[in-house]
Amino acid sequence: MTAITRFAPSPTGYLHLGHAASALFSAKQAGPHGRFLLRIEDIDQTRCRPEYREAIYEDLAWLGLEWETPVRVQSAHFDDFQVVLDMLSDMGLLYPCFCTRKDIQAEVARIGNAPHGPDGALYPGTCRACSAQERSDRIAAGESYALRFDMEGAIKRVGSELVWFDRAAGKQIATPEIFGDVVLARKDTPTSYHLSVTHDDHLQGISLLTRGQDLFFASHLHRLLQEILGYDVPEYHHHGLLTGPDGKRFAKRDQSKTLRSMREEGMSADDVRALADQF
Ligand code: GLU
């Protein structure tokens, strides 16, 4: 069995045991003759830090992992994401959204019983109704805006059912509509997780996409983007999430569980690998 797999952490903190498990799982799934890639997902320049990126390299090497270089660092490729956004825009599938978080909350509260998706309440569509004139006036006036995906238009454009396959959960019929008009370019950064991850997994030829179950639903949306953009469809394997003794998921903010703290406490890479080898 060979595959091209990847581990794609965001350098917003030090890696913990859950990351180690995920990275080891991905490397294992590549098989002895496959390829294992590391990608740094640092589009959020306010939360990501170069020292955490360096720490990722250090911690993964300490664990005994090897990956291909050069590593793709997403913040060096905003131009690539812009090209994709332009394509979607040319298809008429993006619209500017000037709403603040507060505006959206107020509108959702006003509607009452608003539909919710994996990331919370769906966007109520306020800016979808803006006229072309209003859009260009507000942009010309310097109002900041995000770019939202016209979900209904995108599904219509595809016109048929989309399917993807998860090695743990089996065949899935894509239901991207659960995300509503999701943001594909944020106000504060000219792309989004969903856009850049879908683009880069395609660009890097990932054939088996492994990641935690917390991102399972995201794959429904990524499948639609792949279809619209003419990308290959990888196979998926969403793995379980490692929990601590309290039954809670490992989180980056829980510094006591970082790989470096375990290392400093005298644990060996073998010890950590044994703890992390759970999927
Ligand atoms: N960068 C994402 C994270 O650190 C993971 C992306 C993915 O595996 O699709 O949560």
Image (spheres, grey):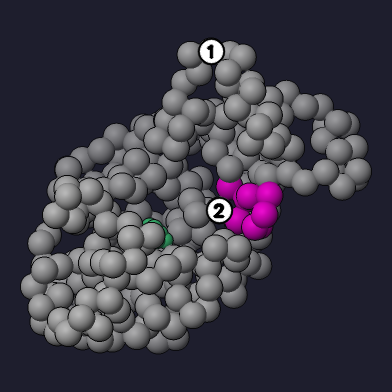
Query: Mark 2 or 1 closer to N-term?
Result: 1
Residue 221 location, x and y as percent?
43, 42
Discs 2/1, front: 1
On whether ligand 1 comes within 8 Å of the CB at mark 2, the answer is no
**Pointer 1 residue:** 112
Image quarter for ligand 1 equals bottom left
Q: Are marks 2 and 1 in contact (CB under 8 Å)?
A: no
Q: Is residue 191 shown above or below 184?
A: below
Residue at (10% x, 62% y) in the render: 278
Q: CA distance from mark 2 to mark 1?
A: 28 Å
Q: Where residue 49 sits in the image (x, y, percent)? A: 53, 73
264 with respect to 116 (left or right) = left
**Location of the N terminus (image quadrant):** bottom left
Q: Is residue 185 magenta?
A: yes
Tell me, for residue 184, which label it has, or none.
none
Badge 1 amino acid: Gly
Question: Dot 2 corresponds to which residue?
Answer: 192
Give the side of residue 203 with respect to residue 61, left or right: right
Magenta highlight: main SS: loop
State left or right for residue 185 relative to residue 249. right
Residue in the image at 48% along x and 51% along y: 194
Question: Where are the magenta residues, as a range?
Answer: 184-191
